[in-house]
Structures are given as structure tokens and as C-alpha cells.
Amino acid sequence: MIEVPVFNQDGQKVETIQVDEQLLGGEVNKALLKQAIVMYHANLRQGTAQTQARGDVAGSTRKLFKQKGTGNARTGGIRNPIKKGGGHAKQTYPTEFRQSLNVKARRIARDSALLSKLQSAEVRVVDKLALSEPKTKQIAKLFKALGIERTCCLATAEHDPMVYRSARNIDRCVVTTVRQLNAWDIMQKRTLLVTKDGLQKLLA
């Protein structure tokens, strides 16, 4: 069992909950976790880089001057790579970098990422997040009270417009719901901040 403290919005500890590692697979599946992170990272690549080869640029294919007898270095058409405005010698084509994992594997990777954060004591649980109006200052105050000084992933049980609009302006923070949470979101940020009902939803 892993003991996880629960805090209120003022940063005061109010209770402790027990988390059974077996609900998250019992141990961290490092190989699958790495595979999932590589997949999410690869899927961020656009792969749209493209350069023009000598067949793509404008210009005549006529040989500029005869091969021998002029005293110049031999050359071909105006579109060859050594000429100004010529095509690239080694062309770059659009590339598809996307990878995929099935749903079961992605869930196991997410559970392994969550278990890793719990074992490293990098999970902060708040009993509730109730904001009457969107104020970034309130979320920043919560981060300071919980000792979150670096990057953070904030996950709520359901989409909360007030929380989202309050935290989205913090550059080191990403806001999501536990339903959308994945291994990349968890491992990319130093601290995982989740509501109590959100954590229970994850464990269920």
C-alpha cells in the first residue's frame, strides 16, 4: 500500500488515503512505458519538411556550354545542385512518423506512469477544487501551498471551465481530465496534481 496525503486548497493536510499497487499493475512496466512515451513523442512530429530536387525547380534542361574546349569547369543544366537556384542534391520528402499502440497497452502504460509518480511521491491530491471565478492567482497560490515549483499536470475528474481558464495561463502547467490522461501527460511534467475524486476514478 502507498500512503498518499490529501490536502485542501490552503495546502493543509486533511487526510491520508491508501492506494493498492495491484490496482495499477503491481509494478512499473518500464519497457511498455518507454514505448508509449516514444509513440506520443513521435506523434507530435509533423513530418511535412520538403525540399525541391533538380526536377522540381524552374529552368531549362539545355546544357550551358560544350563539354570540352572552353577552359571552364564542365557543367550540365542550370538546374543542377551546384548552381544558384538549382535543386537540392539530397531531397527531403514528407515523412509519416506516427506510431500506434492498442487501447490496452496505452492503459497499462498510463497505470505504470501513475504508479511511478506515486512511488516517487510526485503526486499531490486535493480534496476538491472549487473556484467561483477564473483567477490564475488562485491556482498559483495553490501551487505554492503544495510546494509545486516546477512543471505540473493538473487533472480533474470532469471538465471544469473555471479551473481550466484559471490554470491555462501558467506556462509550466497542462490542464486535462482523468479520462484524457495518458502516460505522456504524466511523465512529461514533474508533479501530478489531481483531485481526490479524480484519483478514485483513475483507480476504479
Image: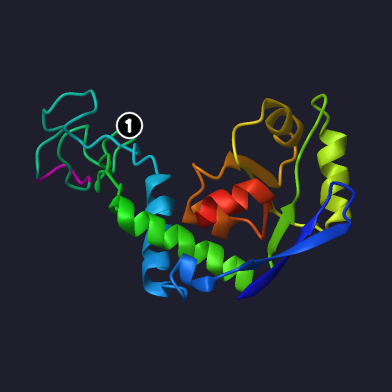
Q: Give the residue drawn at x 55%, y 70%.
A: 20
Q: Which one is nearer the viewer's eye here, 12 or 181?
A: 12
The location of residue 172, given as percent across then percent down, is 71, 47
Whether residue 151 appears in this view of the structure is: yes
- Which image quadrant is residue 169 in? top right
Residue ID for mark 1? 85
Taking depth in this image into account, of 176 and 1 the one nearest to the observer is: 1
Residue shown at 26% from the left, 37% from the top:
87
Does the segment drawn in magenta span residue 184?
no
Point out the stretch of residues depicted in magenta. Answer: 68-72
Q: Secondary structure at mark 1?
A: loop
Between 7 and 118, the one nearer to me in the picture:
7
In this view, 158 is above or below 155: above
User: Does the image show residue 120?
Assistant: no
* Label 1 CA crowd tier, 10 Å (few <14, some 14–19, many 20+): some
6 left or right, relative to 40: right
